[in-house]
Image: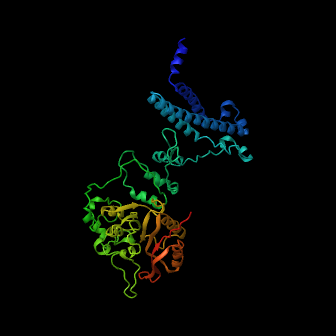
Amino acid sequence: MRGPFVFLKLGTCRGVHRFIFVSGILALLLCFATLSKFYSVGSLLTTDTFCNHENPEWQWGTKSEVRVTIETVVQKIQQEIEAMRDLSMESSSSVSAMKYSSFLADILGLIESVQAFLPPSEGIYQHNSEIRSVHPLTMPKQQSDEPANYFLIEEIRKYVKIKPNRLGKQNFMGANGTFTSIGHACFAMKKELEEYMDYDVGEICNDDWKLAQKLMVHGCDPLPRRRCFSRAPKLYSKPFPINESMWKLPDNRNVRWSQYRCKNFNCLASNSTRKGFFKCADCFNLTDHEMPRWIKHVNLDPNLNLTSDFLIPEVLDIKPGEIRVGLDFSVGTGTFAARMRDFNITIVSATINLGAPFNEMIALRGLVPLYLTINQRLPFFDNTLDLIHTTRFLDGWIDFILLDFVLYDWDRILRPGGLLWIDSFFCLKEDLGDYLDAFKSLRYKKHNWIVVPKLDKDDREVFFSAVLEKPPRPFR
């Protein structure tokens, strides 16, 4: 009578006996599935290896049955988890029910990890006589399509693998896990990426931001996150107040200079050094070069009385009171955003550190830097910005197909009636027509449009500037 009494007592806890039964089945199934990864069922039951090779259909069919069985068990575990949750809502033993539910979720994660190593259920039966004639020991080893298996550094493998949700339930976005990604070019730059991800978890990162930028520029973008602390300047000084920082060179102690030819801002501001990015050699000269920009004409051709520069007041007069927030996709130190701030307009400055600390400079001036390459989709939602401005970066070097992708992405984030300001785009004269066709393909309304010669390249290049307005396009 003791045995029935014990089981009767256990039966008072609803769902517990089911949990014990399912756990036992899962343990057996997990062992069987794990062994099937290394040995075919035929090799366990039949000693004749060549006979097994002559009947590959039977081996693959058994693995297919294992996959079907695992999928059935996964469904039953999910049902059991739901039952446990209902039990926790109905009974007072919610803590125990949630404990069992969490345990089942862990078992579910293990089962799904084993499931990933099994062959797919479709197309398994397909083979040809050429494969049949090859000895099993000489057959090429099947490579996994799992991206994590391509890399040797454990941090990359951990980052790329799918992270299942803890309770085995879809989240509000309909996903069963978190899918972390890296740029496709990362696989072509395996050596550099593994060097970037080779660190001690919880320790200080290497001084390798330049390696990270190299990866980004070459298409390994987005980069994986890292679990190490970024290096900071040794003697960081608090930034200048906002009423001083806008037009004053920052404190040199607030930048790590190890990766630059110049080791201070005065070096960068000097016109004679030219140690920064060649397109922005004067960008750090705030007083003489930067302060007048977009407020008064500085590159006026004395012979033709023409310039490719438009002034901020005349552009804002196109849409009085409507320009509030925008993006400056350029190489610079944030002067465009600083000038627009005088008109109560918020501008985010997107740039990378090409030979100089552009991002640090923008932030130390009290503006918003966006560390971004031209490779990736802009992190703004559709129809949200009033203005996009670009200068000194999107020029005649760019491929026409790439330019198309960039322009359509800009069109995506510009709101209807928003302005696209192409500022001093320069290219060869023979390419001008093709580039103008690319801008005209947007079918924007023209407000300002000018082409002037570029005088420092033997009359072979021209400047092109335009202010264009996005049409409503009320598509249904």
Viewer-nearest residue: 39 or 420: 420
Coordinates of residue 72 in the picture (x, y in percent): 61, 35
Residue depicted at 34% across the width and 75% down the height:
293
Does residue 137 appear to the left or right of 107 in the view shown? right
Q: Quadrant of residue 134?
A: top right
Residue 1 to residue 443: above or below:
above
Coordinates of residue 361 in the picture (x, y in percent): 32, 63
Residue 46 to residue 355: above or below:
above
Viewer-nearest residue: 127 or 178: 178
Q: How many marks?
A: 0
Residue 164 to residue 377: above or below:
above
Does residue 98 appear to the left or right of 140 in the view shown? left
Coordinates of residue 387 in the picture (x, y in percent): 42, 68
Q: How is the image coloured?
A: rainbow
Does residue 137 appear to the left or right of 259 in the view shown? right
Residue depicted at 39% across the width and 75% down the height:
315
Give the position of the N terminus as an image quadrant.
top right
Does residue 145 appear to the left or right of 214 in the view shown? right
Coordinates of residue 43 in the picture (x, y in percent): 66, 33
Give the position of the C terminus as an image quadrant.
bottom right
- The answer to whether residue 333 shows anywhere in this view is no
Viewer-nearest residue: 325 or 399: 325
- The answer to whether residue 71 shows anywhere in this view is yes
Pick out the residue farthest to the bottom: 303
